Amino acid sequence: MPFAWTINPYRGCEFGCKYCFARYTHEFMELWDGRDFERKIYAKVDAPELLRAELRQVRDKGLPIALGTATDPYQPAEKHFRITRQMLEVFAEFAGLDFSLTTKSVLIVRDRELIENITARHRFGVHMTVTTLDERLARRLEPQAPTPAKRLEAVRALARAGIRVVVRRRCAAAITTGSSRMPRRSIWPRAWPRPDKHSGIFSRTGRPSTPRS
Ligand code: SF4
């Protein structure tokens, strides 16, 4: 998932994954208790307007943009603030950009029609993080995030709409911080759904890999 620019509509993330290495970023706000990261969420309500101004100035449209590298853009706060949706509406005013969105949330399906429009105008893909298919382990690791089964349902719904979606075993926060403590093969059951032409599985390095059967 290479990118030159990154956008995070929220600071902090209610999903509260135990392995989340973005937690330390709350220290920039002088919040020293690691749990504040999942309890005190900052919503960047001006972000859509700022994005519009930035995109008007973009000269090199080929530089990849990643939405949601440090916190989940479809975490529960998005139901109320709708900042991610507003940002996607801004992206829909432009064309020819290379950008992606990373999430663990099924709330993304709410914006399926808007994302279909974006897919037609940009080089765009959704990255859905599914760390494990073991529901009990997922609940321990990612206590507030949707279950793996629900995430895979969202993947299917997006893929059926013709949206390019890949499933990742590692979240962007762990990839960008180079975490080596994410769970690996030992917790990965052999039950991957087969990808269709719009979906696939990317390894930690971002290279396409063969799904397990
Ligand atoms: S790993 Fe991702 S989804 Fe989990 S708490 Fe961190 S930012 Fe949120």
Image: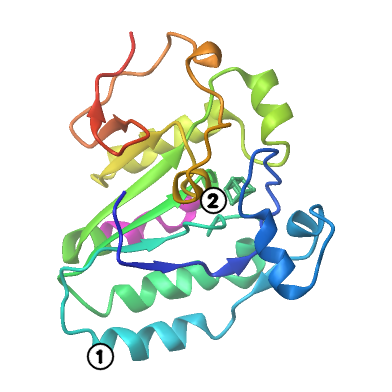
Mark 2–mark 1 distance (CA, rounded to whole Å): 30 Å
Residue 163 visible in the snapshot: yes
- The disc, 2 or 1, on the residue closer to the chain's N-terminal end is 1
Q: Which residue is drawn at 21% across and 68% down?
A: 63
Q: Residues within 10 Å of mark 2 (few under 14, many from 20)?
A: some
Image quarter for residue 116? bottom left
The front one of 25 and 46 is 25
Asked if residue 55 is positioned above or below residue 2 in the image, the reply reads below
Task: Name the element at disc 1.
Answer: helix
Q: Is residue 170 above or below residue 81?
A: above
- Residue type highlighted by circle 1: Gln
**Residue occupying the point 68% across, 58% down:** 24
Tell me the quarter of the image containing the C terminus. top left
What colour scheme does the image use?
rainbow
Secondary structure character of the magenta stretch overall: helix
At label 2, the amino acid type is Leu
Residue sitting at 67 percent across and 41 percent down? 17
- Magenta extent: 108-116
Q: How crowded is mark 1: few (under 14 residues within 10 Å), some or many (20 or more)?
A: few
Q: What element carries label 2?
A: helix
Q: Which of 52 and 185 is in front in this view?
A: 185
Read off the residue under disc 2: 107
Does the numbered disc 1 mark a residue whose Cβ is under 8 Å from ligand 1? no
Q: Which mark is drawn over residue 57?
A: 1
The number of numbered badges drawn on the structure is 2
In x, y percent, where is residue 53?
A: 35, 91
